Amino acid sequence: MDGSLIVKIAVILAFGLIGLGVLSMIVSAVKSLMQGKQDFKRIALMAVPFIVFGISYGVMTSAEQPLVNAGVMTTMVMMGIMVVSIVITGLRSTFKF
């Protein structure tokens, strides 16, 4: 067997496992939502990165590599949201409001 063939098979299998993992998370979320174990807001928060990516991709369509630029922009925006939420949580616990 050729070395590149093994790499291709490994990459396909890795993406397949990632896809199965995402699919199982979606099924679990829908099941928990239907059983009333989870609130819709918590499930909807999982869509935030996809929405940010969609907006980033829409803005970056004129770039040379729009998918790469949108992915980097999504990462930066999500890190910014994380920092702001940590600061707000720290301020809220410090000043008790």
Image: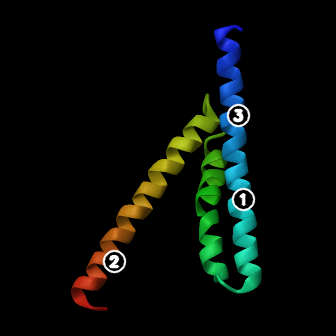
Q: Amino acid at mark 3?
A: Leu
Q: Nearer the viewer, mark 2 or mark 3?
A: 3
Asked if residue 40 is positioned above or below residue 24 in the image, the reply reads below
Q: Quadrant of the N terminus?
A: top right
- Which residue has dot 1 on it? 24
Q: Residue visible at 28% across and 76% down?
A: 90
Q: Residue at x 48, y 57 (%)?
A: 78
- Mark 2 packing: few (<14 Cα in 10 Å), some, or many (20+)? few
Q: In the image, is 89 to the left or to the right of 65?
A: left
Above-or-below relation of 66 to 24: above
Color theme of the render? rainbow
Of the image marks 2 and 1, the number of the one nearer the N terminus: 1
On the image, the x and y values in percent for residue 62 come to: 65, 35
SS of the residue under disc 1: helix
Q: What's under tag 1, amino acid-wise?
A: Ser
Q: Nearer the viewer, residue 70 or 60?
A: 70
At a point 51% along the width and 42% down the height, the residue shown is 72
Mark sitting on residue 69: none
Report which residue position mark 2 lands on. 89
Front residue of 52 and 47: 47
Spatial CA span between label 2 and label 1: 31 Å
User: What label does residue 13 carry, if any?
Assistant: 3
| Residue beneath the point at 58% across and 58% down | 49
Image x and y of residue 76, in percent: 45, 50
Q: Secondary structure at mark 2?
A: helix
Of label 2 and label 3, which has the lower sequence position? 3
Mark closest to the chain's N terminus, 3 or 1 = 3
Whole-percent x, y for residue 39 in the image: 64, 83
Q: CA distance from mark 3 to mark 1?
A: 16 Å
